Image (spheres, rainbow, N blue to C red):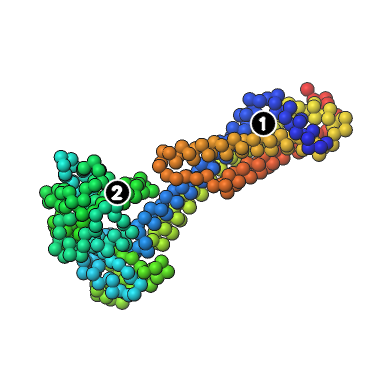
Amino acid sequence: MNLFNLLKITYRSLGKNKTRAFLTMLGIVIGVGAVIAMLAIGNGTRQNIQQQIAGLGTNVIIVTPDATNQGGVRQEVGGAVTLTQADADALPGAGPAVRYASPLVRATVQVLAAGHNWRTTAYGAYPSYFDIRDLALQAGTRFTTRDEQVAAKVCVVGPTVATALFGTTDVVGQQVRVGSIPFRIVGVLVAKGQSGAGQDQDDQLLAPFSTVQKRLLAGTSVRAILLSAQTEARIPEATAGISQRLRQRHRLAPGAPDDFAVHTQTDISNAAGSVTGALTVLLASIAGISLLVGGIGIMNIMLVSVTERTREIGIRLAIGATGTDVLLQFLLEAVVLSVAGGVLGIGLGWGLARVAAHALHWEITVSPSSVGLAFAFSSAIGVFFGWYPARKAAHMNPIDALHYE
């Protein structure tokens, strides 16, 4: 029997029980849709995290306090302040691979101007922070090294802060009060929008490090030092020089653990990639279980179909059909159910991915590889779970089948 006749018989057989055929396909539809959507969300998560890491700046290296020993007891990470402004000033000399360095402090502040107030985050840093983070200005200028030296009350604001206080980003030269201290706006940052985590990157205020440290925080702590390597290829050289210089400055004995931690974009990216990769596999595996359940549903319905059509099978065998013809007929029915479910599932998965992209405000793209994988898997499930019922039909004894009631 040729393929065309087999397809005609398959269409008529499935058409007799349209509702049952659709419900059988539903498991495959949901399974394929879930796999495609989960893979798309996982890949979208990874892309957004990578974009957020790239948003840190160019070739960024971050130094933070690490766990310290006090009285023979290992303290928690960040439990003690082990970094100073003098450390930050010394690090540009850590080697030729280091390009910029800036200490960093932050404070949550209330900013008031023109009868409005806004709660935002104030960062204190050196002018080189703009180069480290690749921050551009849409208006005005950066604060200067001179501003840093005299703890000048000047600031650069993000577009969100400017708009919230003045209703416009044309605010260079305007006065604002940060807490009870007056500041003059000297620049406005170029808008960056939301980060991958949904944080508004334009909701910030930048001021000289000494200004924030002395006037807003009234302390001497340095919670982090940001640096930039000359090139991405020289990041390992830069981190080695930074570690060596800090160990010398902190007078750490040979073999003693560091009281600081050095992080690079590569480290952060690799760690984030491992986590999101594992999450994607987990989500896809959970979704794949529904595909397996759908396959079991196909096997169940095909076994019922074989039982219901026992006399038909006996007649076909009696008038000359071979076991192979019968096997192909029932196997083709299972494959058609699976493939049709896979096609509908692709549409469902794409729709779920678009809904997730809208809800999460992420760029989520359904990759062709995930579509191909889900479709191939659904087709394979049709063959795998349809084989046993088809084989059972093909091996029936014609006489027994004709006498079946």
Type of residue at label 1? Ile
Q: Position of residue 1 (x, y in %)?
A: 83, 36
Give the numbered dot on residue 71.
Answer: none
Give the numbered dot on residue 202.
Answer: 2
Quadrant containing the C terminus in the rendered view: top right
Residue 264: tell me if it is visible: no
Q: Residues within 10 Å of mark 2 (few under 14, many from 20)?
A: many
Q: Position of residue 185 (x, y in %)?
A: 19, 52
Q: Residue at x 41, y 41 (%)?
A: 360
Of residue 95 and residue 282, the one placed in the foreground of this image is: 95
Of residue 215 and residue 166, the one placed in the foreground of this image is: 166
Type of residue at label 2? Asp
Q: Earlier in the sequence, mark 2 or mark 1?
A: 2
Asked if residue 100 is positioned above or below residue 347 in the image, the reply reads below
Name the secondary structure under disc 2.
loop
Q: Residues within 10 Å of mark 1 (few under 14, many from 20)?
A: some
**Which quadrant holds residue 403?**
top right
Q: Residue at x 51, y 41 (%)?
A: 37
Name the secondary structure under disc 1.
helix
Please identify the residue farthest to the right as the structure is shown.
319
- Read off the residue under disc 1: 301
Q: Report how far apart the C-alphas of labels 2 and 1 lie in the structure.
A: 57 Å
